[in-house]
Amino acid sequence: MDSTADDRDERAEYRRTLGAALRELRHRAGMTQDELATHAGTDNTYISHAEAGRFGVGWDTVMRLVHAMNTTIGHLAAEIERQESLPR
């Protein structure tokens, strides 16, 4: 595989890991995708796609999601680390 394909694969894995971390934090907050979307000022399709790792999530959106779930960037970072340690 060439370096461009490796970079794409790595970015896709980052997106999936972030998405899984966001999903876990949403579940811990006891929120549905609809509730999170409403509180974060977006729509449930965006939340669904972000959690599935279909696209990157911008920093401003990450912050809105974190605040809407009443959690912290530190908790998100810890969950990302936990997700990275899980077997694939």
Image (tube, grey):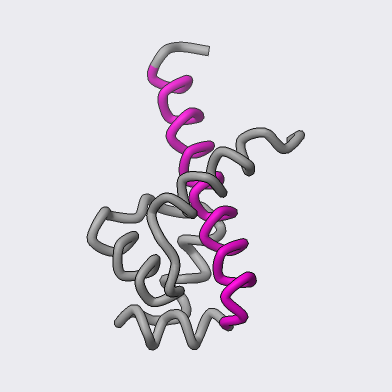
- Give the camera-side residue of 20 and 12: 20
Residue at figure coordinates x 76%, y 34% from the top left? 87
In this picture, residue 64 sits left or right of residue 72: left
Q: Residue furthest top?
A: 2
Q: Is residue 41 above or below residue 63?
A: below
- Give the camera-side residue of 41 and 3: 41
Q: Is residue 73 magenta?
A: no
Q: Is residue 22 above or below residue 26?
A: above
Determine which quarter of the picture holds residue 52.
bottom right
Q: Is residue 18 above or below residue 12?
A: below
Magenta range is: 4-31
Determine which quarter of the picture holds residue 66.
bottom left
Determine which quarter of the picture holds residue 8.
top left
Q: Position of residue 43 (x, y in %)?
A: 39, 81
Q: Is residue 8 magenta?
A: yes
Q: Main secondary structure of the magenta part?
A: helix
Quarter of the image where the C terminus is located: top right
Q: Position of residue 31 (x, y in %)?
A: 57, 82
Residue at figure coordinates x 45%, y 22% from the top left? 5
Q: How many marks are shown on the rendered structure?
A: 0
Q: Is residue 48 above or below residue 30?
A: above
Residue at figure coordinates x 72%, y 38% from the top left? 86
Q: Residue furthest left?
A: 60
Q: Position of residue 57 (x, y in %)?
A: 35, 55
- Give the camera-side residue of 74 and 32: 74
In this picture, residue 46 sits left or right of residue 52: left
Q: Position of residue 16 (x, y in %)?
A: 54, 47
